[in-house]
Amino acid sequence: MSDQSPPPGWPPRDPDTPAGAPPSAPGPHPTPKARPRRTGWRRFLPTWRMLLGTLLLVALLICGALVAGYLLVDIPPANAAATAQSNVYLYADGSQLARDGEVNRVNVPLSQVPLGVQEAVLAAEDRDFYSERAVDPKAMVRAAWNTATGKGTQSGSTITQQYVKNYYLGQEQTIKRKVKEFFIAIKLGREKSKDYILEGYLNTSYFGRNAYGIQAASQAYYGKDVNKLTTAEGAYLATLLNSPSAFDVVSHPQSRDRAVARWNYVLDGMVKKKWMTPGERAAARFPEPGKVRTAAGLSGQRGYLVEAVKDYIAEHKILDDKTLAEGGYRITTTIDKRRQSAFVDAVQNQLMDKLDPQARPVDRVVRAGGASIDPATGKVVALYGGIDYTKQYVNNATRHDYQVASTFKPFVFASAVQNGSRTQDGRRITPNTLYNGDNKRRVVGTRIPYAPENEGQVSYGDITVNTATDLSVNTVFAQMVVDVGTEKVKRTAIDLGIPEDTPNFVVGPAMALGTMQASVVDMTQAYATLADHGRYTPYTYLEKISKDGDDIHLPDRTPRQAVSREAADTTTSMLVSVVDNGTGTEALAAGHPAAGKTGTAELDRAAWFAAYTPDLVTVVSVMGQDPDTGTLQSLYGALGEARIGGGGYPARIWAAYTKTALEATDPEDFDLELQPGAAQPPPPPPVQPTTPQQPEGSRPPWQRPDRPTPPGPPTPPGPPNGGQDNGGQTNGGQNTGGETNGGQTQGGQTNGGDTTGGQNTGGQTTGGQTTGGDTTGGQTQGGQTNGGTTQGRRPPSHFLE
């Protein structure tokens, strides 16, 4: 029988109390056990209830913001980019340089765009366009993470978002614009079809060459309507969407490898999506785009200047291509109008007016490029890109496909001083250090077998570094670059201003001869660092960019000491000697103290002169390029000369320009702080270069054409039996206040009526040679000069000067 409940009012019986036992004394009920109070650092941790509540609150706020954003943000009318304005480019004095023309845009329905072209664009930009939502949050987060962690700036945008940015908003990188883009894309994706959005995207995207939309791009690159494009051509246009300026292989040939790689990426994506068969992919060939058709307003140098400024803006991430293409910007450049005009006149008078393509077909290949920088500020004050942007659209001042030749050699010596380098036998490298300058001397201290030829295959014996620089002796600098360390030399060149990604910038003994392919502007930057006592100031074309009264932020260009003043100034002292006594004497016509270096590229495809006064640095290059095929060509025979050397036309252009550019200033000497032991060199030993014996009937050794031969005493006739008579040795006189150094001349050679002019090789005069015998004249210490030649075209050379 179960227990019955106690009558009302009775206290409950304790189940542990035996039956019949007296009840316990009445009292209060026992209280439940309290939770332990948190002490110490645990007091500051939120409880799980607090965390859960916070998360719920945040989720509610996000949902509320999304709903509010969707309701409040409407699809706006088309933005100003649909009718984009022109940009205005100004000289440094505020006068107008150029206006980049009206916008080229033609809209077409999607039905006129071949399916293969549509799929190529999707493969390039958004392969899941037809199956995805209007926005991809995961892609946006991934892009933001990659950008924040330094893996590259990425948009993370779908084609819908890109269309919204192109047509409704703008290219500015702001949070406000991104938020609007997000909500408009969602709304547009709900209200419009995928075909409508793709059509709009194709008609509003910027493809470069001032072309907006696929139809304008088809005409600009292939000269045909969009409905006639092949899939391969469409894939190239899709490639341009990623970087319109950089991937134009015609105007930027140095970017060809990157553009082709991107084109291959597009086609491979089409195969992955089964929009193209592997067989069709294998048969595809890169479709070469046509020439650039430029606006008349960009004729002459204006187009080159505008193109260089636009590339600078894009490369330094000041504005991207699409943002700049929207227009409305006032861009004040650093270009000095007077100096720019002087540069054009110098090239025209010293080079172009002397060309005669009808009489000499080789003159058709002659090109020129130049740049001039103020070393104290890094401002580019003048630029010569070519004969006319509407006729020759590749900018010769910024291209990267010609070897810099011996203009690289000063970087080797600067690195030697910077690093306190020594020769293989432990002697400190200074301008007075002796090196063996024999032709084809094997470089010591490297596992790479290397025995370079000297210019003219001349052997010099033991000569100082200073003399080797004057005469541009290859074997000396090939040995020196190993003594210093090829990696150290490359580091020094980069510190001076040569971009690390310069084509063919490969470490090894041959780098001393200038096998890398830096642009004229890059070389001007590096020489400007030497001119400013080793202080590197990044170059710029920009004074200011503004739009609607607001200035655009420009990148910081704080100078830094790239190499020690001692290294830079000692290098300058040797380059002064090159102008005074060596291969660069044509520069003396400028009327200002100058330091410089000549260079002649392999197969004579380019001739360089890089030089500076204390306050102006200018580099000039004369180049060979076929005007029809664009291939690099040798300059043999151009302008009626067997060879075009750096000390000839490039140095004359430099002198004519510099004389005008500095006509309002007094000549200024260099203020140099030299390496110990470099200031007062000991008397150098006499230099007695020798050349290989020529077999009977062969061509004589090549004589440098770019050093004029001063008049000298007539050469006595050779002995009738072919004997040899050695003349005496004399030292040239010197006049204080205007120093005159006696030249060294290698006398002419007569073979059946052809005469080769004399050559100055650093202090030696070799008499003329006749069939009946050889006569060696006296030897003169002093400067060096090269005579001209009428011997005919020189056989191809495979080494650099």
Image (cartoon, rainbow, N blue to C red):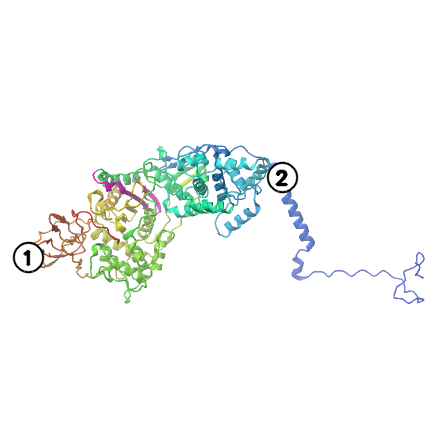
Query: Which residue range is magenta in the image?
Result: 359-386
Residue at position x 6%, y 58% from top? 721
Depicted 592 relative to depicted 108: above or below: below
Q: Quadrant of the N terminus?
A: bottom right
Locate residue 347, reporting x and y percent: 26, 41
| Residue type for callout 2 | Ala
N-term-proximal mark, 1 vs 2 = 2
| 197 and 95: which is toward the camera | 197
Q: Secondary structure at mark 1?
A: loop
Q: Residues within 10 Å of mark 2 (few under 14, many from 20)?
A: few
Q: CA distance from mark 1 to mark 2?
A: 106 Å
> Which numbered dot is residue 340?
none
| Residue type for callout 1 | Pro
Locate residue 512, reporting x and y percent: 30, 56
The residue beneath circle 1 is 719
The question of residue 612 being in magenta is answered with: no
Q: Residue furthest front?
A: 279
Tell me the mark number nearer the camera, choosing from 1 and 2. 1
Depicted 344 relative to depicted 28: above or below: above
Locate residue 669, reporting x and y percent: 25, 50
Can residue 672 be seen by looking at this rendering? no
Residue at position x 48%, y 42% from top? 120
The residue beneath circle 2 is 68
